[in-house]
Structure formats: C-alpha cells, structure tokens
Image (cartoon, rainbow, N blue to C red):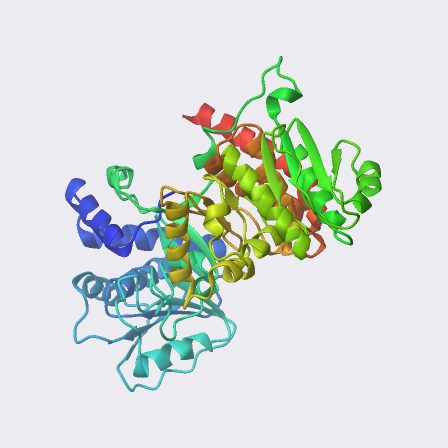
Amino acid sequence: MKILSVEQIRAWDAYTIEQEPIASVDLMERAARAFADWFASRFPDVNKPLYIVCGSGNNGGDGLAVARLLAQRHYSPEVLLCRIGRILSADCEENYRRLKRLGTVPICELEKGSVPPDLRSGGLLIDAVFGSGLNRPVEGYWADFLEWMNAYSGVRVAIDIPSGLFAERPLEDGSVKADYTLSFELPKLAFFLPETGDRVGEWVLRSIGLHPDFIRQAESPWHFLTEANLQPFLRQRRRFEHKGNFGHALLIAGSYGKMGAALLAGRAALRTGAGLVSLHLPRCGYAIAQEAFQEAMVSVDHHEYLFSRPPSLDSYAAVGVGPGLGTNSITRRALLELLEQAVASSGPLVLDADALNLLAEEPEPQKYLPKGSILTPHPGEFRRLFGDFPDAFARLAFQRQLSEDWGVVVVLKGAYTCVTLPDGSAWFNSTGNPGMATAGSGDVLTGVITGLLAQGYRSELAALLGVWLHGKAGDLAAEALEQEALLAGDLVLYLGKAFKFLRSWQKESASSS
C-alpha cells in the first residue's frame, strides 16, 4: 500500500472530480458517509453525549456533514463551529446550510477569544477542526482551544487526521491527541513515527471511491507493508526437494550468560524453513545447545566464554551475527575478521544487537558491510551507530539515504518497524503489537531473516517477509496468550501459524480474483 503526500492526495481528489465527474461537495458527502458508517458501528450507543468540533475549512465541512448524517441515525450531536477564518470554505459553507436546514442539531459558533461551553463528561468528541492541509503550527487561542479539547474526559475521534498534526513533518506545537482516527483511502506518514503517531491513537482506513487509475500511477518512496505486497513471493515447497534445497544458516551468537539469545535465533531460523542451522558458540555453550536444541549443529569457538575467531563461511548460504554476542575487545577483532571474510566473498550478512554495537566503534563501518547486508537495529543501536537526530522524520530521511548509499537493507525496529531498501523505498510493517517488547524478540527476528536468506530469498524480500512474519507470529501469540504474557519463544512457536495465515490469504485472494 502506497503512502502519498498531502499534495498527491489533493491531486487524487481533483483527478477523481474531473474523471468521474463528481462535484467536490458530493465527494465530501462520500467521506462523511464513510465516517458515519464506521462511527455508528464502533460507537452504537446513540444516547451518549456527542460533540462535533468543526473548523472553517474542508475538514470542518466533513464534520458538519457527519453531524447531519449522525442526526439522521438518531444520534443527538451538538456542533461547535470554530470561525477560524473570515469565511467558510465553499463546501464547508454548503454543509453548514444543509445542517441548518435539518433544524435539529444545535450549533454553537466560536470565535477567537470565545469561552468554550461546558461539555457533559463521558461522551464522544469528534475532531474536525484542522485537516491534513494545515501548513503552519497552530498558535495562540486556537492552540489553547486544542488543549481544551484534549482535556475532555470522553473519547476523542479525529476525522482524517488529528487537528494540529502535520501529515509529513514533525509536530511543532500542540495538537489534538485522538483515541481514534479515521483516515480516508490511505494512512499518513505521520501515523508511523513515534512523536506524531502517538497523537493518532488507533487508526482505521475507509475508502471514499477515489479513482483507482491515479494511485496505480502515483510514485512514492513510502509504503505500508501488508499481505498483498508479499502474496506473490511466498514460495511453495515441491515434493522432491530436500533439506539441502533450503539452505544452511549459520548463527554466530551467544556468550557466557547469554546463550538463550543464540538458541532463540537458531530455533527461529529453523522454524522459518532453513534446511540446516549451525550455531557458532563459545565452548561454554556447547552442552547447552546440544541438550536444548537437538535439531541444530554446533560450531565450537576456541574461547570458553565468548566469540574469538570466525569460522569459514564457505559452507553456509546465510549468516546472522550479533544476538547475545557481547562487546569484548576480543569479540570486536573476531567480528571484523568475519566481516572482512564476508566482504571478500560478497555474501550478505544479517547484523543485529552487539554486532551493531561493535560496528558503531568503527570510524568507517560501511567498508565492513557486504552489499545486500541487513542491519536490524532498535532505536538505541541506531543512535549509537549514527548519532542523534532532531526528530523521527530526520532519522527516517537519513535511514533511507543510508540504505541507498551503502547498498544495505536497514530494519529499524519499533511499533511500525521500518525497512529501507537500497532503491530508496521505505516500508512500514503492518503486523506486531506491544507484547513483543520483551527480551529476545529481536533475536527471533534475526533468526527469521537469516532463515529466509538461507532459502534463497534476496535480501530485500528476506527482510520484508521476515519482519511481517515475525510481527504476525506475535499477533497470533498475543491473541492466544495476551500481550502481557508474551515471551520471545512464543514467537518461534507461532511462526508456522503466521506462514499458514499468509498462505491461506494467498488462496483466498486467488479465489476472489
């Protein structure tokens, strides 16, 4: 799913108006009806206090139309119309007239300096003050007014985007903090980044029938990763294939006291479909692995407690390194030897955790990275590697440029894990939940991606498919166990169900097409 800019969405509206053709006020009616349909299904109690706060632009026009439609469904909305500009936009003015003609919805008009009315507690407040076309920070009285909205004791629901929030740049001042946001057609870039996404709450999408030709032709570096993107690429196993066809994965992981990270990564690689998995472990991990992970082979390091000397990489289809590795100076030298060997053989690596922390100590880390390598930092590891950024948007721009310049895939883990590819595209993952914020979850992801790489998936697809499967396994595990009880090992156990879900989706998609 593409994520378009505000200018592109505006052009899409205009294209639809011209091609159907349809009047802009009728397109607004579609949007209001889509919102009203969703709202009525999500909040069916028509007796709750309901306040709809409208601005003077087209977002306000949406809100006025929603007030009329919900009144016709037996809700009792009260409208607060904010006279922010000297005049209402044309479509907002038309919906104001339509609402007045209905005659059943009270309208309280507010101007700069007005004292907002008292609202009954525990109700619903729909935010339709400023839309995605906002181009400057909200200041003064209206900024204070948005904070007044935030102080409301009930549920806040935003139409398209919370007021005061920019769709594709950092928050510069206050905004509404919504509990729910209904966005039309596509999500906004701001939904996926922590500083701004926290203001959106739970977001949902509804189509208003914008012309499909436009989105097919539109170009954007931003994407929302869903089943539809991965559906064509999930491989089917053939009857006469054997374990040699599915690759031999090597995980270099673990140190004294951190052997569990190696076991989690190794199990994940096997559960993802690698034919063979070897763990390269310090000597103290040999007995642990042989007893706890019978399916794996063990390559034993010379050192008793840590990674000190890399094995030859010639026998392996894919190599993942980092989980539980430690940051000892001996391990640092061994990692650099490993990376030099990989660069010489042009084999991509998966680097995570302490491999990234050690790489951050190098003045020119890119020279140690084979093209197509996959880096999987969490925000702290990303900061250690590349320094601080003024905001998440700046960090995202840097991440995209980094993937292009270094020819690597970067998986920045978070609420919407962002995968940037060497072609400059960025993909935000649609799966996963807060229950996955638990020790070892990243180790499992390293194993998943390494297992896919071993099977011959190219780096870009191994990262995208791996991130989606990892998150889906987490969603399925949380559904069965609840988020609070989720352990990293549960992600490994639910990987099979994640594959099954995607494969079933493939069949359903094929049968419906």
Residue at the location (76% across, 31% down)?
295
Is residue 465 among the parts visible in the rendering? no
Q: Which image quadrant is residue 326 in?
A: bottom right
Residue 421, compared with residue 95, is above or below; it is above
* Front one among 104 and 280: 280
Q: Where does the image place residue 366, in percent across and percent down from the top left? A: 46, 49
Q: Quadrant of the N terminus?
A: top left
Q: Quadrant of the C terminus?
A: top left
- Position of 459 with respect to 333 (left or right) is left
Is residue 162 among the parts visible in the rendering? yes
Q: Where does the image place residue 472, in percent across and percent down from the top left? A: 58, 42
* Front one among 3 and 334: 334
Q: Which image quadrant is residue 240 in?
A: top right
Residue 56, compared with residue 5, is above or below; it is below
Q: Where does the image place residue 257, in percent across and percent down from the top left? A: 78, 54
Q: Where does the image place residue 263, in percent across and percent down from the top left? A: 73, 43
Residue at the location (63% across, 27% down)?
315
- Position of 213 with respect to 493 (left or right) is left
Residue 274, compared with residue 170, is above or below; it is above
